[in-house]
Image (tube, rainbow, N blue to C red):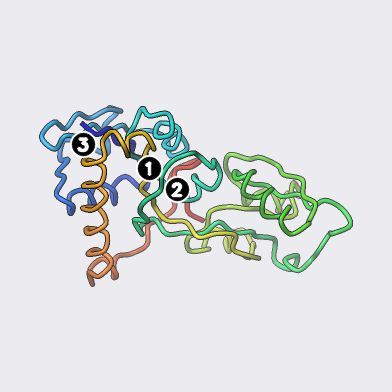
Amino acid sequence: MLTIALCKGKLIEPTLELFARAGYAVAQLATNSRRLMFLCPEIGMTFLIVRPTDVPTYVEYGVADVGIVGKDVLLEQDSDVYEPLDLGFGACRIAIAALQGQASRDRLSSKIRVATKYPKITERYFNQRGVPVEIIKLYGSIELAPIVGLADRIVDLVETGNTLKAHDLVEVECIAQSTARLIVNRASLKLQHKAVTELVKKLRAASAASKRSPKAAASKPSRRAGRNGARTRR
């Protein structure tokens, strides 16, 4: 059996819909259940429901053969996993934002204070541009930091930008785009090659079909939900 780590939060429903379109019916996996493990012997799979930030860890250490998680989490953690497929859903971006009227202000003579839950992505981005930065790690309510003077900038996950506007913030620059990704344990790719490659093939076909579907194109964007790596939208 393949063991698959899925994200709690916003990505789980589109993930299960994708699996269903790929021919893997997981009706017994209830998204509102408190259970964290679901055995599905009829399709040869076991599903683990974990925090998004933990998905790469479960896959890297071989507890799960396969996982689905946002690219933002992968960029932050830089885990040693194989990433064969961009699933396309859960689209958002990792962006820099500042208060209205302060977006063009540069403080190159001193460190820029940046509040974020993505310290590695943030440090890497500013270091590559030679800009000194002081990173303030927060786990939520990132938009509050510039308002109260805690930080000059924030780096956060943005989908529609409505939350930024509601707090008088403007997007300064996009660091990276993020969508849901399929990741695979490197050992499992060899030891369970047939099962893994079949899964990748079916999910790729189902994902491509959904992108071509008028219904999928007309679907409304998801609203903000979750915490930490739980695909919180801004």
Q: Which residue is mark 3?
A: 29
**Disc on the earlier residue, 3 or 2:** 3
* Circle 3/circle 2 CB separation < 8 Å: no
- Disc 3 versus disc 1: distance between alpha carbons? 14 Å
Disc assigned to residue 9: 1
Find numbered disc 2 in the image and state the secondary structure of the residue it sits on: loop
Residue most extreme to the front: 190
Where is residue 49? Give x, y as percent.
33, 33
Callout 3 environment at 10 Å: few (<14), some (14 to 19), or many (20+)? some
Q: Is residue 72 left or right of residue 223?
A: right
**Disc on the earlier residue, 3 or 1:** 1
* Residue toward you, 167 or 233: 233
Amino acid carrying mark 3 in the image: Leu
**Disc on the earlier residue, 2 or 1:** 1
Image point 39% across, 37% down: which residue? Answer: 186
Disc assigned to residue 122: none
Amino acid carrying mark 1 in the image: Gly
